[in-house]
Image: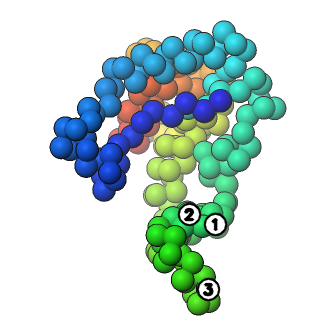
Amino acid sequence: MSAYSLIVEDGTAMGRMVAREELPAPDDDLAADMYELADQVLGDAGYSWYEVSNWARGDAHASRHNLSYWKGHDWWGVGPGAHSAVAGTRWWNVKHPAAYANRVLSGESPAAGREVIDDETRYVERLLLAARVRGELATSEIRQEARGRVAGLIARGLVDGSAAVRGRIDLTLQGRLLADAVVRELLD
């Protein structure tokens, strides 16, 4: 079960409507309340979280496809706007379907751009993505100078203390709501 919160993207019709105040902007407090309710209802139904926005009835039922992104595996995207990441290089296709089709039919690559990931970016992304997955981030992966901050995150109820003793960074329910802030603290 996936439950992602709404993110209004710039350059979209919805983004323009929110900017013109024709639609209300998403309410962060309401989103947090809805997330907590979803976690409770899903937990009562036998689901447990395995990634910040995903729940399953046991590890065997977690989406392997979904986890491949969060664990940093290689993946190929096909189609307009699709993204791919293979062997430290990422690329993305043109977004417009007609432009994509024209490129493919003319024997051109549909890629609109690409980047090679450097070591620092790889480290930041590893922490950012792995922290979202229960049991995926080892404390040993965090730079030595930031490991001392884990105790403060535990004290604030953002990281599970028993998991940390076992060498893992597992976010609590509150920590999942503030996952990006937790990661920023581990990176600063």
Q: What element carries label 2?
A: loop
- Residue closest to the far bottom: 106
Q: What element carries label 3?
A: helix
Depth order, front residue of 8/166: 8
Q: Which mark is residue 105?
A: 3
Q: Which mark is residue 78?
A: 1
- Residue closest to the far top: 44
Name which residue type carries label 1: Val
How many residues crowd mark 1 within 10 Å: few (<14), some (14–19), many (20+)? few
- Residue closest to the far right: 60
Cα–Cα gap, marks 1 and 3? 14 Å
Q: Which mark is residue 82?
A: 2
Residue located at (55% from left, 48% from top): 126
Marks 2 and 3: which is nearer the front?
Answer: 3
Cα–Cα gap, marks 2 and 1? 6 Å
Whether residue 7 appears in this view of the structure is: yes
The x, y position of residue 110, in whole percent, is 55, 78
Residue 98 higher or lower than 117, as above or below: below
Sequence-first disc among 1 and 3: 1
Residue located at (19% from left, 38% from top): 21
Name which residue type carries label 3: Leu
Name which residue type carries label 2: Ala
The x, y position of residue 4, in whole percent, is 51, 34
Sequence-first disc among 2 and 3: 2
Marks 1 and 3: which is nearer the front?
Answer: 3
Whether residue 151 appears in this view of the structure is: no
How many residues crowd mark 3 within 10 Å: few (<14), some (14–19), many (20+)? few
> Going by the image, does 20 lie left or right of 3?
left
Disc 2, disc 1: CB below 8 Å? Answer: yes
The x, y position of residue 75, in whole percent, is 66, 60
Q: What element carries label 1?
A: loop
> Going by the image, does 160 lie left or right of 44?
left
